[in-house]
Image (cartoon, helix red, strand yellow):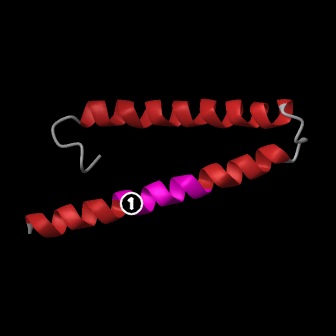
């Protein structure tokens, strides 16, 4: 919410929208791997992969934010 500036309400709405998209994507990908015949353990691997992608996105976002804050200072 700190980086939303004057659009705090929009930032909050986008936060909830991203949560809903991630929830739907995880459920869909879990169903896809089960339907592909990979068994009932495969969704756990999909979840681990999605978590790893999320950590990468977090690290990139934090790096960009730090660089922008340092450039503004």
> Where is residue 25, by image quadrant?
top right
Q: Left of 6 or right of it: where is 45? A: right
Query: Compared to 16, does 46 lie above or below?
Result: below
The quarter of the displayed image where residue 28 is located: top right
**Which residue appears at 18% of the width and 64% of the height?**
69
Q: Is residue 18 above or below residue 2?
A: above
The answer to if 48 sits in the magenta stretch is no
Residue 35: image quadrant is: top right
Q: Position of residue 44 (x, y in %)?
A: 78, 49
Residue at screen point 41% across, 37% down: 15
Say few, some or many: other residues with alpha carbon within 10 Å of mark 1 (under 14 / 14 to 19 / 20 or more): few
Q: Is residue 34 above or below residue 5?
A: above
Q: Report the side of 68 relative to 17 (left or right).
A: left
Farthest-out residue, left: 73
Secondary-structure class at tag 1: helix
Query: Depth check: 38 or 25 in front?
Result: 38
Q: Is residue 41 left or right of residue 72?
A: right
The structure residue drawn at horizontal position 54% and vertical position 30%, both measured from the top left corner, is 20
Quick one: quadrant of the C terminus?
Answer: bottom left
- 15 with respect to 66 (left or right): right
Q: Is residue 60 magenta?
A: yes
Q: Is residue 58 above or below residue 28?
A: below
Q: Which residues are magenta?
A: 52-61
Residue 14 pos. (x, y %): 37, 33
| Residue pointed to by mark 1 | 60
Please name whichever residue, 60 or 73, is drawn nearer the observer in this view of the structure: 60
Q: Main secondary structure of the magenta part?
A: helix
Q: Position of residue 54 (x, y in %)?
A: 53, 53
- Residue depicted at x 79% and y 37%: 33
């Amino acid at each position: 919410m700190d980086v939303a500036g004057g659009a705090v309400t929009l930032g909050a709405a986008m936060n909830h929208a991203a949560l809903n998209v991630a929830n739907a994507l995880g459920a869909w990908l879990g169903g896809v791997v089960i339907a592909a015949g990979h068994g009932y353990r495969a969704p756990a691997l999909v979840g681990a992969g999605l978590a790893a992608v999320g950590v990468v996105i977090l690290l990139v976002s934090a790096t960009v934010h730090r660089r922008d804050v340092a450039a503004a200072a």
